[in-house]
Amino acid sequence: EAGVTQSPTHLIKTRGQQATLRCSPISGHTSVYWYQQALGLGLQFLLWYDEGEERNRGNFPPRFSGRQFPNYSSELNVNALELEDSALYLCASSPPGWGNIQYFGAGTRLSVL
Amino acid sequence: GENVEQHPSTLSVQEGDSAVIKCTYSDSASNYFPWYKQELGKGPQLIIDIRSNVGEKKDQRIAVTLNKTAKHFSLHITETQPEDSAVYFCAGGAEGGSEKLVFGKGTKLTVNP
């Protein structure tokens, strides 16, 4: 069974540009979570999508947004990129009814120059 | 909101010794506590979890204990092996609540052969 897949693996952008990161959950999983992992910090919760709806968001500015598609895949958009947005962005998925059990992908490394 | 603190930030042990990582949480509503292992270049992998109705859970060389009164939980790894070297994260969340996990800042475990 395929795990959570994220693309691209690496992304290099310049300040002010927009970045789009993609995530495919494990088959059968309906919830997708996005986390930011900056160097030396833990995982910071960004967004939670379930059944196509945004259910919760972390303490991040509105330029971080996303959506979940009918096939439960998701994308994270970061507008007006800033240098401090450089981080590993992790996507996790969980099956319906399993609450907080989250399975992570390998992440997208975003570098803002 | 929930706050999870994790100690130590780095831990070095000899192969065969035991390793213990401790976490405390602040929100008494939290009832789900997973532990993740993150190897270099990979996403976090769920290794064990515990719910608040259980005081201890064991899976081969790995065990987790939970003290709800003191609001702390610990990861115990016995007979450590070099392949146990990784960054370990604890997390806390309220199942059925916001569904987000709050992570500790991680412990870098090094097992010396």
Image (cartoon, rainbow, N blue to C red):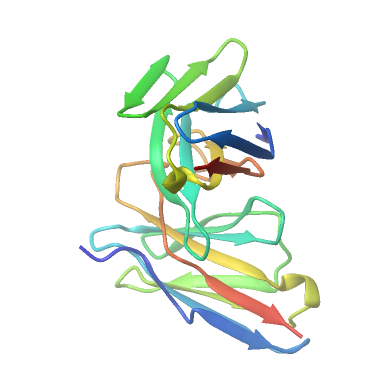
Tell me residue A64's x, y (percent). 65, 70
Tell me residue B96's x, y (percent). 43, 36
* Horizontal side of residue A15 vs A98, given as left or right: right
Tell me residue A82's x, y (percent). 78, 78
Camera-nearest residue between B8 and B110? B110
Q: Residue at x 59, y 84 (%)?
A: A11
Residue B80 seen anywhere in this rendered image of the structure: yes
Camera-nearest residue between A43 and B63? B63
Q: Is residue B110 above or below residue A105?
A: above
Image quarter in which the N terminus of chain B is found: top right
Residue A79 seen anywhere in this rendered image of the structure: no
Q: Residue at x 29, y 62 (%)?
A: A26
Camera-nearest residue between A80 and B14? B14
Q: Is residue A60 above or below residue B62?
A: below
Q: Quadrant of residue A72?
A: bottom left
Tell me residue A32's x, y (percent). 42, 60
Q: Residue at x 45, y 62 (%)?
A: A53
* Horizontal side of residue B102 vs A60, given as left or right: left
Q: Is residue B32 above or below residue A100?
A: above
Residue furthest toward the top?
B69
Q: Residue at x 77, y 87 (%)?
A: A16
* Horizontal side of residue A47 vs B35, given as left or right: right
Residue furthest toward the front?
B113
* Horizontal side of residue A113 vs A95, given as left or right: right
Q: How many marks?
A: 0
